[in-house]
Amino acid sequence: MDINLAILPGDGIGPEVVHAGMLVLEAVSAKYGHTLNTEENHIGGIAIDKTGTALPDETLKTCRDADAVLLGAVGGPKWDDPTAPVRPEQGLLGIRKSLELYANLRPIRSLPGSLEISPIRPERIAGVDLVVVRELTGGIYFGEPRHRQVVNNEVWAVDSMVYSASEIRRVAQLGFKLAQKRRKKLTSIDKANVLECSRLWREVVSDVASDYPDVKFEHNLVDAAAMYLISRPSTYDVILTGNMFGDILTDEASMLAGSMGLLPSASIGQIKNRLGFPLGLYEPIHGSAPDIAGRDIANPVGTILSIGMLFRNSLGLEEEAKDIENAVESTLASGARTADLNIGANEVLSTTEFTRVVIKFLTSV
């Protein structure tokens, strides 16, 4: 198969983890006889430096023409001025909106051979296997009005949480379909006791649930869910929630696995690629980590597992996806650790060294 990918390394450790991911991509493509065609472009801070905008038109065109997009990370101290008219995050929000990527899938698993990585007691996280479906193009990150103004000599700031019933319905349908393929349980998370948006969310999700009678369905308030993710995480299967709540809860849930560096994500929508699969954007959930950029110590697992999701969701290649996931699991079970996972490890591996171990397991079966 010819595979056409848009590569957006971005900022900070983005280029390092994307380079590691590309080595894995090349290895799995060679193993299965695929032809890999890539085009690299800028997004985020580096795009601002080179073009004056966080999402150049050329980058967007490359992404639209590709089968899938691999992204590293955006942002860093250089562009951290909150009053700046152009910020790296605008590139990330812009590409989600432009490619209509309305759902972000973030799987979280505890791996039997590496439970000690998590700061949470092993008996609490044993058997954790959940996926968060986060609505990605609505909510408070995109709502209008948003502004600052001075009223009676006092500075006021306004951000608006806005959702339409159709936005909620489409992501809920995706969540329930995913639950049907898993353990047939979905938990919708909101703040319906306070927020009008959440009351609409609850009404629409409850209505969609009636179309999926085989899926066990429940509501959680977001504050209770934050507690349950630590106290009883294995009871969750598919978690469905809005943009901001999903952003916050998945960072918390990363501790179930042990590090943000371990978690992949897939952002998908209604646009199909030339193969008839969803055009998706794949990235680790971590940020640009500028404090460790350029030191070859970043954890590449989130990026590598994101490539597994890319093979599954945008290329329809399940065997390749499984091979990547099994290679990562075998690598961690062997005791290989990057600096962020250094809990009783005999040897801490660099990004490059860790990636070599993954490729060794990948190509040995």
Image: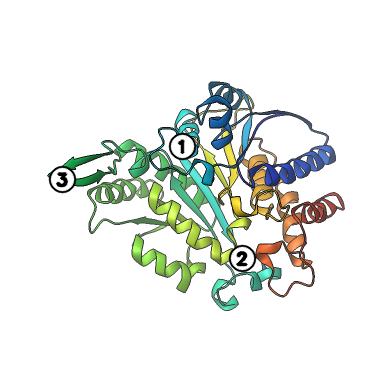
* 43 vs 240: above or below: above
With 306 as the anchor, is 101 left or right in this view? left
Front residue of 349 and 236: 349
- Looking at marks 1 and 2 on the same chain, the residue that comes earlier in the sequence is marked by 1
- The total of numbered circles placed on residues is 3
Q: How dense is the environment of label 1, judged by Cα within 10 Å: few (below 14), some, or many (20 and up)?
A: many
Which of the two marks, 3 or 1, is nearer to us in this view? 3
Task: Judge left or right: residue 142 versus residue 80.
Answer: left
Residue 135 visible? The answer is yes
The image shows residue 346 at horizontal and vertical percentages of 79, 72
Residue on which disc 3 sits: 153
In what element is the residue under mark 2? loop
List the single residue furthest toward the right: 364
For marks 1 and 2, give the one nearer the viewer.
1
The spot of residue 267 in percent (x, y) is: 53, 40
Classify mark 1: helix, strand or loop: loop
Which residue is the site of mark 1?
Answer: 87
Amino acid on which the number 1 mark rests in the picture = Arg
- Give above or below for 146 relative to 116: above
> Label 3 vs label 2: CA separation?
52 Å
The image quadrant of residue 122 is bottom right
Secondary element under disc 3, as helix, strand or loop, is loop
Q: Residue 6 in the image: x percent, y percent? A: 65, 30
- Spatial distance from mark 3 to mark 1, Cα to Cα? 28 Å
Q: Point out the residue furthest to the left here.
A: 152
Q: Classify mark 3: residues with Cα within 10 Å, few (<14), some (14-19) or many (20+).
A: few
- Select label 3 or label 2 by which is in front: 3
| Residue appearing at x 47%, y 44% in the figure | 80
Q: Which residue is mark 2?
A: 110
First in residue order: circle 3 vs circle 2: 2
